[in-house]
Image (cartoon, coloured by chain):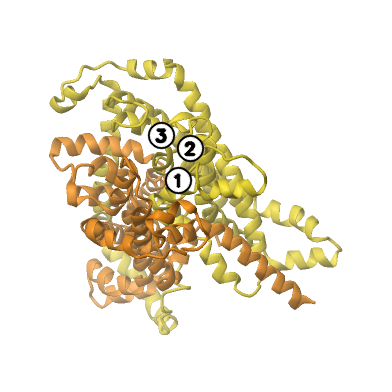
Chain colours: A yellow, B orange
Amino acid sequence: MSNAAGVVTSKVLTPKGGAPADPRGTRQRRHGQGARGRVSRALGRRTTWVAIAFVAPVVVYLVAFYAYPLVQNTAMSMHRYDRASFVTGDAPFVGFDVFGEVIGQARFWRVVGQTATFTLVSISVQFLVGLALAVFFQNNFKLSATLRALFLVPWLLPVIVSGTTWQWMMNPDNGAMNTLVGWFGVEPVWWLNAENALMSVTIANIWLGIPFNLVILYSGLQAIPQTLYEAAAIDGAGPWRRFWSITMPLLRPVTLITLLLGLVYTLKVVDIIWIMTMGTGTSQTLATWSYGMAFGKGTSGVIQYSEASAVGSILLIVALLFGLVYVAIQQREEK
Amino acid sequence: MARAWNAWKTTLALGLTAIMLFPIYWMVNVSFTARESIRKSQLFPFDFTTEHYGVVLNEQLPFLTTSFVVGIGAVLLTLAIAAPAGYGLAKLPVPGGRYLSFVLIVAQMIPAVVMALGFYSIYNRLGILNTIPGLILADSTLAVPFAVMLFTAFMRGVPNELLDAAQIDGASAWRTFRSVLMPISRNAAITVALFTFLWAWSDFLFASTLDREGGALRPITLGIYSYIGAQNQEWGPMMATAVVASIPTAVLLIVAQKYMAAGVTAGAVKD
């Protein structure tokens, strides 16, 4: 979830926090208001063209670097490509045959199940831990701001860094994780073998995602008026009661958004899994399966561009479905 | 009593932070431990050495340079495309502006592996696989939608009067954008630049698909990854490289925390 930050942007960042407030702003307003009407009418149609000119680069960019690769991906899933025809480009059109073959494979539903487990366990644990930490960090104690900032580190580090570190900590012979479970009398675990791989990559992924949940939920908590808590305290509500009757209901929109974003991001995770296990054993998800088929290595020895694109397209459809739910909820909240 | 309670909270928070950051400590610890002692898994680098960092300097310098160039390239490209678009969406009557904003949100949800597949076949045809410009283009897609949305949100907060005043004085829209709006939007630009650099620097997926055979033109993420595939995994140099690859994150977090925080919480929650 390396670029999780991005999505959440919608509204808030205003110049009030950062940009120097213009001390002359108020004076200019009086001066400007009468003139503005005249100016904008005079500019009229020309400003529309100016506006188009300013957004044209990003529109061209989106078409060239988002739409085109997507069309290309879909086209590949409907033609039967192999290594040779990938170079020459004359693969036969087969419609949805490749999709049928992929879904028909015995492992398809197993991979879907693993993807669901990875995603749901990741986002629910991340959310619960993130929420607990956010509530805890709401207390103003010494060093609270500094320590909260340090909690961001796992999320800002390159995943290759965390991935290799977790891989080493999960080394069966002398990794730190086995030392840890050893203290509780547990026998050494083969963390990264076929059977345990899903659990292990999920643990690492939870660690990666906690900061994101903490940050969003913390700012959500900050938005709840303190007076509500004070009033409830006067009425005799204890901390537990205040949490369930004030915090949780008022945090509901933020909760929904956090979980949906987490879902969309976790579905498409490739890097942490690939770096730790190459998608072997139970850690294969739709995303790593697609990646492995397209770019060799891992569990699939041969390159299968068409199958990879088909799996990628299935993943895309699922991600976009949840993405649309997210957009719908966000639109409703803005009203 | 309140003070004692506060001290307890600080202690608890220190403990939690230590647990959370343990993997990072462990990486640093291993990177300073001599080869023979790494497998002992000691809590401190008793058998201290800096030789792994010597290996990093010898082997990883070209990859670090590539990552740096790719990061800077992605930042410049992203700023050039996103800042004007932010102005357009925030302040000018863009026809269909709402749809554009919608497309930007959706664009961020597209799985990177799908993008990588599309890019791979396009790059293959254009002959720009394993090139730095190709990687810059792909990495910029990680940031452009985010950047446009951040600029839009920020610029919407700039008073119209400022911009109108410039136009009344005869400045063109471009001049207003460049000489009035951009200087005010400095903080937004810095936030965008920091995140774009960090994402491009950290990118593994595009690098491992579009720049696999780039030799010295591969970024540092692949430099680390090449240790994983090796028959005899060299954990010392690997962890030392990982530490070096984490430096941009550390610098940004310390030097630019204000901007980072702005980007992280930007619009996470409304109002």
Q: Residue furthest front?
A: B36
Circle 2 SS class: loop
Q: In the rendered image, which residue does mark 3 sit on?
A: A287
* Amino acid, disc 3: Ala
A154 or A135: which is nearer to us? A154
Q: Are marks 2 and 1 on the same chain?
A: yes
Circle 1 SS class: helix
Between the residue at mark 3 and the residue at mark 2, the CA separation in whole angstroms equals: 19 Å
Q: In the rendered image, which residue does mark 2 sit on?
A: A192
Label annotation for residue A167: 1
Between the residue at mark 2 and the residue at mark 1, the CA separation in whole angstroms equals: 8 Å
Tell me the chain of label 2: A
Residue A307 occupies which quadrant of the picture? top left
Label 1: few (<14), some (14–19) or many (≥20) C-alpha neighbours in 10 Å: many
Q: Earlier in the sequence, mark 3 or mark 2?
A: 2
Q: Is residue A119 left or right of residue B56?
A: right
Residue A297 occupies which quadrant of the picture? top left
